[in-house]
Image (spheres, rainbow, N blue to C red):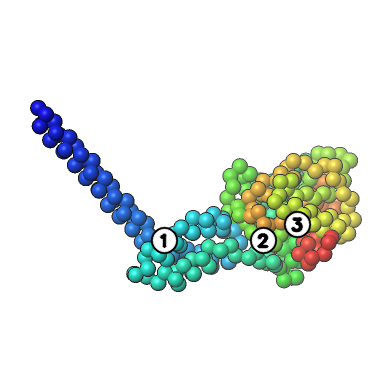
Amino acid sequence: MQGRQRVLVEIGLFAVLATAVATLFVLTGLRGAGLARSAGGAGPRVAAPARLAEDPAPVVPAGAAAAPTGPDLAGSATGVGPTSTPGARATAEATATATPPVDPRRVGIIAGHSPYDTGAVCPDGRREVDVTVDVAARVQALLEYRGFSVDILPEHDPDIPEPPLQNYRGAALVSIHADSCDIAGASGFKVASWRYSSTPELDQRLVDCLYDRYAAATLLPRHDESITIDMWNYYAFREIAVDTPAAIIELGFLLDDRAALDDLRYEMALGVADGIGCFLGGAEG
Ligand SMILES: [Zn+2]
């Protein structure tokens, strides 16, 4: 019985050893495959910067794309050397994954509520979204005439972050809204930025510029006391790239400022465009 037991133990030990060796083989094979995949994956990664440069709203955040590439780069450079040109690939990938600089002339404009919903609606049918779409188009025309590239960005379901708002990068972003139609006695405009912004000074300078230039263009008073959480915690602020200065403006109240919202849309657009120009031109507003 003892001899038989010893044989069984030896068989068991051999099985364990064989399993270990097999595992080592599998792991080595996987590592090799991983390196090969990382080498083969250089194509799409190299193509990425062209898309990022052209498309202001990259689907994948630049930072997230850059992070996991580091180990791959080291792997391709050292492990796949004999069958490739690791130096060139490493350089290309490093270039591809670096965060591109923000275009200093690119501006994002959100036409409030379009095309997601109507925003405020007056009893006679006047809709907030009709005002914001028109003013946004005028802002775009003014800024493009001045040499800026303007992206009119859509609103979407605030609960579902998605492109092109998500990770949008620009030199500035301004969202254009108008206030409700059911507050009698309220007149004026207001501007706000994200309370939890990582660039509060920049945002505040944009806000100050918009306040100054919009008031000058429209002669409307400020109505800061009605700034709500929907403004200072506006969902789009949480979606766009952290290095994109942003503000939201309420052009006026659809009830008491109705005449201005119907007839002064050029002046409103001029105030917004001048405010953005003030900010990007380096003026203190
Ligand atoms: Zn609105």
Whether residue 114 is situated above or below residue 144 in the rendered picture: above
Which picture quadrant has residue 213?
Answer: bottom right
Question: Few, some or many C-alpha atoms within 10 Å of disc 1 (few <14, some 14-19, many ≥20)?
Answer: many
Q: What element carries label 1?
A: helix
Whether residue 68 is situated above or below residue 182 in the rendered picture: below
Across and down, in percent, residue 52 comes to 56, 63
Query: Which sits in the foreground, 191 or 184?
Result: 191
Count how many numbered circles sit on residues in the image. 3
Whether residue 181 is situated above or below residue 53 in the rendered picture: above
Cα–Cα gap, marks 3 and 1: 40 Å
Cα–Cα gap, marks 2 and 1: 34 Å
Who's the residue at 68% across and 57% down the image? 244
Across and down, in percent, residue 152 comes to 67, 59
Instruction: Kindly identify the amino acid type of the residue bearing the numbered disc 2.
Output: Gly
Instruction: Kindly identify the amino acid type of the residue bearing the numbered disc 1.
Output: Gly
Image quadrant containing the N terminus: top left
Query: Which sits in the foreground, 156 or 39?
Result: 39
Who's the residue at 78% across and 67% down the image? 281
Q: Is mark 2 on a helix, strand or loop?
A: loop
Across and down, in percent, residue 22 comes to 25, 48
Instruction: Kindly identify the amino acid type of the residue bearing the numbered disc 3.
Output: Leu
Residue beneath disc 1: 75
157 left or right, relative to 67: right
Image quadrant containing the C terminus: bottom right
Extreme residue toward the top, this view: 1
Residue beneath disc 2: 170
| Mark sitting earlier along the chain (2/3) | 2
| Foreground disc of the pair 2, 1 | 1
Who's the residue at 58% across and 66% down the image? 53
Q: Mark 2 and 3 residues: CB-CB less than 8 Å, in contact? A: no
Question: Residue 240's mark?
Answer: none
